[in-house]
Image: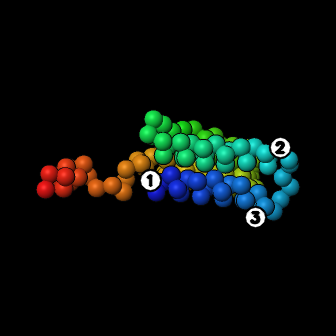
Amino acid sequence: MWGRVVEIMTAAWMVFSPYIFAGDHSETLLILNSLNALMIASLAALSYWPPTRYAHVGILIVATGMLIWGRFAELPPPPFQQNYIVVGLFLMMIAIIPNEASDPPRVWQKEVDHA
């Protein structure tokens, strides 16, 4: 489940990034940024609960929206929007990692259980 931890850490980065990339950010933009971060963290956290173990796949939708907005909202994109592009691509890579990525293969687990 290390992928979900990385997604939650990325959500924390999203909250603090407007203050790191100095610029003229409107209040609406800061609120939308925080809502994006909350959505990412919520979907990652929901993946820990077995009935919603695939909730992290919804992060792909959020990441795609971030990527499109970061690329086309203003040309050329300022640093704040460039951050959206990079974070969107990063989240797309992490969101496809399964929850059981660090577990041993099931065949090995069965052999250990029978031994």
Judging by the rendered image, the residue that carries numbered circle 1 is 1
- Residue nearer the viewer, 58 or 68: 58
Q: Secondary structure at mark 3?
A: helix
In three-dimensional space, the C-alpha distance between marks 3 and 2, rounded to whole angstroms, equals 17 Å
Residue 104 location (% of width, % of height): 28, 56
- According to the image, label 3 marks what residue? 20
Determine crowd level at label 1: few under 14, some 14-19, many 20+ residues with C-alpha closer than 10 A.
Answer: some
Q: Disc 2 marks which residue?
A: 28
Q: Is residue 16 left or right of residue 23?
A: left
- Which residue type carries mark 1? Met
Q: Is residue 101 left or right of residue 4?
A: left
Visible in this render: residue 22?
yes
Q: Give the camera-side residue of 110 and 81.
A: 110
Gap between marks 1 and 2, in whole Å? 33 Å
User: Disc 2 marks which amino acid?
Assistant: Thr
Does label 3 or label 2 sit earlier along the sequence?
Answer: 3
Residue under the image location 55 percent in, 46 percent down? 45
Please give the name of the residue rendered at 46% of the width and 57% of the height, measured from the top-left corner. 2
